[in-house]
Amino acid sequence: MKKLNILLLIFLTSLGLVSCKKSFLNEKSDSAYSPSVTFKDSLGLEAGIAGLQESVREQYTMQSTQSLLCIFQVGTDAAIDGNGNGEEYPYHNYATLNSQDAAALYYWTWAYRVITNANQIIKGASDSSTPLSAQGRNGFLAEAKFFRAYAYNFLITLWGSVPLVDQPIVAAKTDFVRAPIDTLNNFVNNDLLFSALNLPNIDAVKKPGRISKEAAQQLLAEVYLREGKPDLAETQCYNVINSGKFSIATTRFGIKSTLPGDAFSDMFIYGNQRRREGNKEAIWVEEQQYNIAGGSSSFDQHRRVWVPSSYQVSGILICDSLGGRGLGRLRLSPWVINGLYKGNDMRNSPYNLRRNFYYNDPTSPKYGQKVIATPADTLYRIVPYTTKWNFFIPTDINGTGDYKDLIMMRLGETYLLLAEAQFKQGKVNEAAVSINVLRSRAQATLITASDITMDFILDERARELIGEENRRMTLVRTGTLLERVKRLNINENTTIQPYNTLLPIPQTEINLNKDAVLTQNPGY
């Protein structure tokens, strides 16, 4: 018994000695899923890129509430508040936009999360001990740098000067400062030039939906335009257009090509949006898939934002032709509805912009009749809307989420970026030719050089890209948000101020940054 007690004392003493050593508390993650371990071979880096793709997809699909998407449209020239419930309100009433804005906090945090993830992958792929061929190494670096540049371009456009984080942060940091715009621009340019040089062309990517050389070139064109370098932007646009990989959709295609519709609407039908599904305009598509693990990010709310809540009108049932179960979180502005489209423009056809509704409940005495909306219904139930986000699955009628693919880049926008670059160099004849490529497809009246202005190009972007482009980014990038809101959006023109062209830096970020001054944007 005495011997047993001695042995127990020795064991407890040795345990105490071990527990008192500081090294006992040091984390050793050799078998854990940490970046320092995971991104040490091609399998780990592939997983990292998949995670990075997921992070980027969350930009437009991971909403804490259903109205978060609205901030990119509401309070611009294109849209006004509909049946919103929070985040978009300060953008409908700019007088209430301040540094506590929930949407600004969400997207600031989102962007730096993408940058952080990209930095980890770049560090792992850059390590000479990681067993990769030169081509493989550059491929991983190019893809991660594309996403890092994409996030930084988002930040620079909407906030201006922001902190530059170009390496993984391995310890607490509370002394961030805003980097000069020129420094940030050079950083983004270098990332994208590397990506454009080292990414494969769109027909050689590892898997559908992966980033291609042409996507990097298109993003670089947009960046150059923001930087005031239209000549360089023009070159990048031509790189995409002259690659021979893409073509404007001028004839019917896809799963509903024998049904009523047109070539423009075919691009936005679920089952037609991807390159391998026949969409030869698609440059970058974020793919989503119904009822597949990992096939979506939370519940994508595009349909609930863009499609009106017509089913709330007695006599109307949820159905495919009415876009599924929408909630009309936003409405197209009166300018879009009444002033944007002229003549027989395909983009204004009933297949692309629905204006009329009919009672479709067979039990209703009004079955088959056109709906005559009451004033209350025109807030979010019976309103004209773009059909690009129509989505309906019979087995999921109420549809808590949307599973349509996100067309992030397509050739139609390439021609619009090209026209902008040409106009800014005084090449108005060439700009008219570029825009007429799209107007010809739309069977709209062709224009001449005398029609070309920056306003016309922005109008044409709305005609072509409504519901697709981040309209706020476009107007901020071109320095036209304030003027166009005041002139074209009567619901917002009484409250917007010049300082509202940039978003507020989240106050929580400023407060946490205790060891340096993170300067707030003026006005907030």
Image: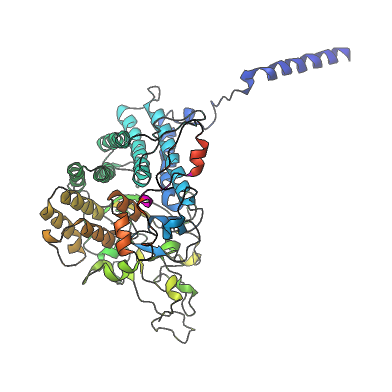
In-image side of 416 versus 294 (left or right): left
In the displayed orientation, state which residue is furthest to the bottom: 365
Magenta stretch contains residue 122: no
In-image side of 110 versus 277 (left or right): right
Q: Identify the image's colour scheme: rainbow, by chain, secondary structure or one colour.
A: rainbow
Q: In terms of depth relative to the viewer, which is nearer, 401 or 223?
A: 223
Q: In terms of depth relative to the viewer, which is nearer, 243 or 271?
A: 243
Magenta stretch contains residue 505: yes
In the image, residue 204 lies at what x, y percent? 28, 42
In the image, residue 367 lies at what x, y percent? 43, 84
Q: In terms of image quadrants, where is residue 271?
A: bottom left
In-image side of 300 versus 150 (left or right): right
In the image, residue 33 lies at what x, y percent? 52, 33
Q: In terms of image quadrants, where is residue 203?
A: top left
Q: Residue at x 83, y 13 (%)?
A: 6
Q: In terms of depth relative to the viewer, which is nearer, 502 or 6?
A: 502
Q: In terms of depth relative to the viewer, which is nearer, 47 or 367?
A: 367
Q: Which residues are magenta?
A: 499-506
Q: Residue at x 43, y 32 (%)?
A: 120
Residue 296 visible, this orientation: no
Q: Main structural element of the magenta stretch: helix, strand or loop?
A: loop
Vertical position of residue 123 compared to residue 506: above or below: above
Quadrant where the N terminus is found in the figure = top right
Total numbered labels: 0
Q: Residue at x 71, y 15 (%)?
A: 17
In the image, residue 28 lies at what x, y percent? 56, 24
Residue 378 visible, this orientation: yes
